[in-house]
Amino acid sequence: MKFREYSSQLYVVLAGRFINELGRGLTLPITTLYFNTYVGLSMTTVGLGLASFAGMGIVSVFLGGYLSDKFGRRRTLMASMLGSAVVYGLYPWIRSAPAYYGFSSLAGGFLSLYWPSSSAILTDLSRLDQRGHVFGMLRVVNNAALGLGALLGGLLVDWLSRTEGDAARPYRLLFYIDSATYLAYFFIIWLFVRETLPSEAREVYGGFRRGWGEALRDANLCLLVPLMVCFTLSYSNFMIFGVFFQRYAKLTSSQVGLIFLINTFLVALFQIPVWTWVDPWPRTRILTLAAFFLAAGHLGFLLSGIPPFRGFSTALIAIVLFTAGELLHAPSSDSLFSSLAPKHLRGTYMSVQSFTWGVGMGLGPIISGRFLDDDRPRALWSTFILLLALAAAGLGLLKRKLPGEVDQPSRKRAR
């Protein structure tokens, strides 16, 4: 991969994304703790707030796709960043459950405008054969920034807690810093990023109803969606790792934290080299291999909770296998959605891609939580292994239907 082949605008967008994700990393690990411990909201209330965030986010990704195809990627990104800056800047002032529900919904709404428009702008700025690398770079930026933000946030809270009389004040400061990073990205887009929506695409776009009608008539897109939901459901298990590992694998809190750190480190270190190696392959083949590694990781998680395999060593092997699947899945999935999209519907198609994540991450914890409440961890991991096997089978069907340059874009250098 030659970095000089890419548009300088692409690097500006990624740099802004790093700053923004750094801010998100500061607050992502502490939000539930802050509202439960320092605002006094029950965990049920906090959970409902998270559900309102996710629910509004699912609705908002479709709006974000429409706005980016109708009015442009740049305007939609700026609206997302400015709205998010205001909402997160007001988070420290929340004192009641109704206010928490309202601001959580607004946060999910404004933030989710970002995903389809940012994916569309990266698609506009890259060739068909470059998109796997571009979305691979995006994952490196996201993971590195989130991990660094979480580390800096923890250090900042520890440092300020020794000097502040108000124990909640360090957490409120993190929300203000997070708000500032959204505002910084807003100004980066305003000052340095041009509109990338092609003029011919703006003329062809027929509006929300016609655009979605065209998208829903794309049989390849309609088949790709449930297959990718199977993958995102498997990712959602990240949310219950802590409970599973401590309850069944008998890991300590520090060992669970190390598992998460290893995953983040491996993605940041190996995403680009791994994708450079597999980029010439058909995307459906890469995704099938990803399903295999993710399923192997899930089998490892299952074994880590069963004697005589129980313990940290098995969990470590499992997270490495899981991460290998993650490295293969995300860039190839993003590449398929973006390459299927006509120029005038890139925002719409990428909102569908964001929707698959919303569905998976929303339903997954409910399914996983029910299995764990019923004390059925083996059924939990077996269910997700089965879903990944179904996805692999479906990819065989999709391969026969996809245009060759979409499945294997290295064959044809095209925009």
Image (tube, grey):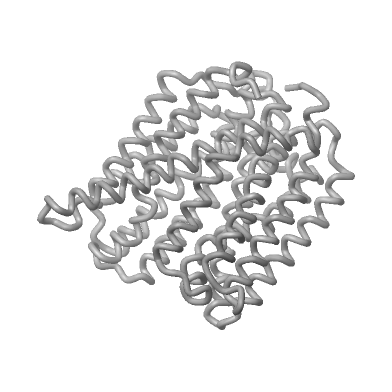
Between 64 and 186, the one nearer to me in the picture: 186
- Quick one: which residue is furthest to the bottom in this view? 374
Left or right: where does residue 339 sit relative to residue 190?
A: right
Between 17 and 226, the one nearer to me in the picture: 17
Quarter of the rendering occupied by the C terminus: top right
- Where is residue 193 shown, x and y percent of the image? 48, 21
Left or right: where does residue 289 sit relative to residue 256?
A: right
- Where is residue 185 shown, x and y percent of the image? 40, 30
Quarter of the rendering occupied by the N terminus: top right
Q: Residue at x 80, y 34 (%)?
A: 408
Report whether residue 362 is seen: no
Residue 203, placed above or below residue 378: above
Between 167 and 121, the one nearer to me in the picture: 167
Report whether residue 199 is seen: yes
Residue 270, placed above or below residue 383: above
Query: Where is residue 258, by image quadrant?
Result: bottom left
Q: Residue at x 60, y 54 (%)?
A: 320
Residue 26, placed above or below residue 257: above
Query: Where is residue 94, by image quadrant?
Result: bottom left
Q: How many marks?
A: 0
Between 326 and 231, the one nearer to me in the picture: 326
- Where is residue 90 shown, x and y percent of the image? 27, 47
- Where is residue 331 shown, x and y percent of the image? 65, 40
